[in-house]
Amino acid sequence: MSEETKDIPMGFGITAETKDSNNVKMLAPIKVEASKTFPNGYKFPVGRLVNVVAKKDYETKNGKTDVIQFIFKDKEGRQHIRTEWAQDTTDEKYSKKVDAMNSRVKHMYTQLYAEFPEKGIGVNAKSWFGYFEAMEAAFKSNKEYHKIPLFLKLVYFNGNLDFPYSPNFLQRAGEGVICKLEINLKYDTIDQSSGGGAGVPNLPGGGAGGDDIDFDNEYS
């Protein structure tokens, strides 16, 4: 062994202190005693939107396509990515799917910023990637977007944690703010091991529940 490497820990040896699990708690709402912040008894995680990225020719199991990704993180650095995909113009449900995507993106934008731009977002786009680039630019036009704490509604669809397919799934958080996101167990699956409404789009709601949050220390 050379002089350069003989003092470097090699990581050999399993002990009582060796971790035998690397599971990270998922960012799903949890059932708790109702409180002022979460009056309906479900505590929603708090995160921030840290990046928005348009990607051309993104590799998927079905080939390459254009996407835009909204990247959220909590204070532990755990991330959740909302991906919106270019839609197939030959799909008979094309218009419905595009309208739903537009609603989701506008919902995210309006929860971050008080006013929607009068000129709209991407109304003159000529391609899916151009449209996604316009979305990215719109979100990044305000440098403060990554500082804004948000309640996140993340539920399971077929074993994967994701935002519901229709609003409301985000809400600005803050000192004294009452969370108005809602869990409806007829549609929402919040336990990965349970069945429930996996794969069924959620409908907008009002109410919610959980603990009060110390926002001074939330992202210390």
Image (spheres, rainbow, N blue to C red):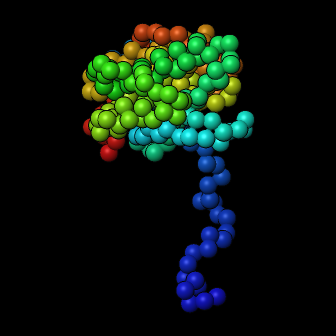
Image position, residue 76 (x, y; %): 44, 44
Toward which corner of the image does residue 144 lie, by quadrant? top left
* Rendered residue at 66%/52% (across/down): 20
Q: Can residue 34 be seen in this view?
A: no
Residue 27 location (% of width, % of height): 51, 32
What is the x, y in percent for residue 42?
A: 47, 19
Place residue 142 in its image quadrant: top left
Q: Nearer the viewer, residue 122 or 76?
A: 122
Would residue 103 be visible to someone looking at this image? yes
Q: What residue lies at 57% left-to-right and 24% top-to-bottom?
A: 155
Name the side, left or right, on which 18 lies relative to 52.
Answer: right
Q: Nearer the viewer, residue 128 or 126?
A: 126
Q: Which sits in the foreground, 179 or 67?
A: 67
Figure quadrant of the N terminus: bottom right
Residue at horizontal 73 percent and vertical 35 percent from the top:
62
* 27 versus 107 height, above or below: below
